[in-house]
Image (cartoon, rainbow, N blue to C red):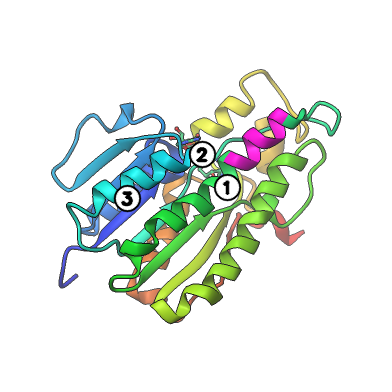
Amino acid sequence: MAHTSTAVVTGGNSGIGRATVELLLTQGWKVVVIDRDISNLDAVRPELTAYQADARDPAAVENIFTELAGSVDRVDALVNAVGIEYVGTLEETSPDEWHRVVDTNLTSYYLLCRAALPLLRQRGGAVVNVASQLSLVGTARFSAYTASKAGIIGLSRSLALELAPHGIRVNVVCPGAVDTPLLQRQFADGPGPQGSLDDLAAMHALRRLGEPAEIAAPIGFLCGPGSSFMTGSVVVVDGGYTSW
Ligand SMILES: NC(=O)c1ccc[n+]([C@@H]2O[C@H](COP(=O)([O-])OP(=O)(O)OC[C@H]3O[C@@H](n4cnc5c(N)ncnc54)[C@H](O)[C@@H]3O)[C@@H](O)[C@H]2O)c1
């Protein structure tokens, strides 16, 4: 890289976001993490800055980018990997739960794209929004989660069209089930709607869960110059989950 590029990774404290932070650091990026928990980022390296904030909070998100504008002249990539899982039937899903899931998984991505725009617009750049294989298929007892994740595709495709004149590419990555704290928490109390963790692994053509680094790799590609003709793309990285 001729210059030091700056990437903002939201949800960078854990799982897929964390693996993306590690990959981008090894590729020479300067990385800014936004997460409600930054406790795993203790071993701070000079090229890593972390902000603790709730990505659902418009003022908190705006403030971070205003502060960032004091130290960087542009942002080259924004990776949104904030997210929570939620399992519940329609009747179990209260309006509060619905809003918690949609605000965390979808509204936060809108807020983050909007707040990052002035810095992304400086030289153009890449936005990578992490959705899910469940953006593409239905799953009983996952309606709030799947609705939030399908919404990311609509948001991203529209932004791809709107931001192309500014040289900003917007793409989506849809991971299959990936072995992260989010997934481990979902199965902590035993089997769920998709059975056990082994049953879930078997729903993938490759008969296993993904590793965070296997999702970080295509995210890194979408941040970099190798994907310069890609925008509005939905990149499915799901071990064949949606190929049946
Ligand atoms: N793990 C999977 O099987 C899987 C599959 C498909 C999609 N995804 C998606 O990938 C993304 C990353 O998931 P993961 O498995 O790495 O999860 P994870 O729980 O390991 O990491 C998610 C991160 O987001 C942060 N976060 C959550 N809510 C936040 C908020 N309101 N404000 C700020 N930070 C917040 C958490 O603190 C955490 O660091 C999510 O969008 C998830 O929906 C995960």
Rendered view: 107 above or below 196: below
Label 3 Cα crowd, 10 Å radius (few <14 / some 14-19 / many 20+): many
- For the image, the number of numbered tags is 3
Residue carrying label 3: 65
Upstream in the sequence, badge 3 or badge 2? 2
Q: Which mark is residue 135?
A: none
Q: Amino acid at mark 1?
A: Thr
- The image shows residue 56 at horizontal and vertical percentages of 51, 39
- The image shows residue 29 at horizontal and vertical percentages of 23, 57
Residue carrying label 1: 107
> Looking at the rendering, in which quadrant would you find the C terminus?
bottom right
| Quadrant of res 218 | bottom left
Residue at left 40%, top 44%?
Answer: 61
Label 2 Cα crowd, 10 Å radius (few <14 / some 14-19 / many 20+): many
Upstream in the sequence, badge 3 or badge 1? 3
Residue at left 44%, top 81%?
Answer: 165
Ligand 1 under 8 Å from disc 3 Cβ: no
